[in-house]
Image (spheres, grey):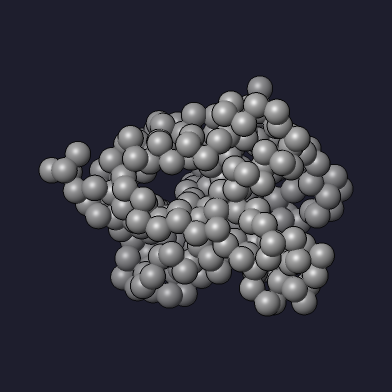
Amino acid sequence: MIKEKIIKAYENLADEYNAKIDYKPHNAYYDRPNTLKLMGEVKDKSVLDAACGPGKYAEILISKGATVTGFDISPRMIELAKERNKNTGFFFVQDLATPYETLNDNSYDIIVCALAMHYIEDWNSTIQEFHRVLKDDGQLIISIEHPFFEFNYFSSTQYFNTEAVKCIWKGFGKPIEVNSYRRPLESCILPLTSNGFYIDKLIEPKPTKEFEKHDPKHYKELIEFPAFMCIRAIRKPSKAN
C-alpha cells in the first residue's frame, strides 16, 4: 500500500532531512519564503502545522510569537520536531488523511500544510477536517508541487487523471523511493471551493537570490518555470456555508 511506503521512506530519510532542512535550496529558498509570505502577521495566532516534518516551520512561527501545534505521519519526524522546538509547541503523530480526533472545532487561526498534500489520493476529507478545526475567516496556507510541472516530470499522458507516481530522491543520503499522487489543477482547487473555502491568493513562486548561490542550475530552471504552487484559502464564516 502506498501509505506504508510513504511512511517507510520518511522514517528512513528523517534524520538527513532534518540535518539539511535549514539550507536545502528547494525548502529554504523556494518553498518557505513564498509560503510564509502568504501568512502575514502570526504573533499571538494559533497555528496548526499539518504534516510538520522535523518542525522547521513551527520553529520559525514560534519565534514570531505564534502558538503552534504540529503533527506528522512519521514518528521519527515528530521526535525531531520535539527536539528542534524543545519545550515549545505541541507535536504528535497523526495521518493527514484521517480525522483529527484530538483537535477541537474552530481552534486555529491558521493552518499551514507545506509540500504534503500530494501524499493523499483524495483531498476532500482532509480539507473538510481543515475547515472543521479552523476558525471563521481562518487561513489555510498550502504549498504543493505545481500540477503542470508534475505532468511533465512524471511523463504523464493522462493529465486529467489523479494517478500514483514515484521517483527516487537522491538529496538525503542514500537514494530513497518516494511515492505520491499527481493530479490536475482542477483537483487541487475544487476540494477547497467545494468544502467551505474561497481562494484568496495563488502564487507560482520564484526562488530567492540565495537559491542561486547554492544551486545555480535549478535556480535557472525555476526562474523560467515553476515547480511549486502556493495557495491561501480562507474559511468562509459558518453562516455563509
**Percent x, y of residue 113:** 49, 51
Asked if 209 appears above or below 7 in the picture, the reply is below
> Horizontal placement of 4 versus 36: left or right?
right
Answer whether residue 182 is visible to the viewer in this image: yes
> Horizontal placement of 128 versus 28: left or right?
left
Residue that appears at 69% across and 77% down? 210
Residue that appears at 49% across and 29% down? 122
Answer whether residue 112 is visible to the viewer in this image: no
> Horizontal placement of 100 versus 230: left or right?
left
Which residue is more in the foreground, 38 or 202?
202
Residue that appears at 51% across and 70% down? 60
Asked if 110 appears above or below 133 in the picture, the reply is below
**Percent x, y of residue 217:** 82, 65
**Percent x, y of residue 85:** 53, 65
Farthest residue, direction right? 174
Q: In which quarter of the image is the N terminus?
A: top right
Asked if 215 appears above or below 132 in the picture, the reply is below
Determine which quarter of the picture holds residue 238.
Answer: top left
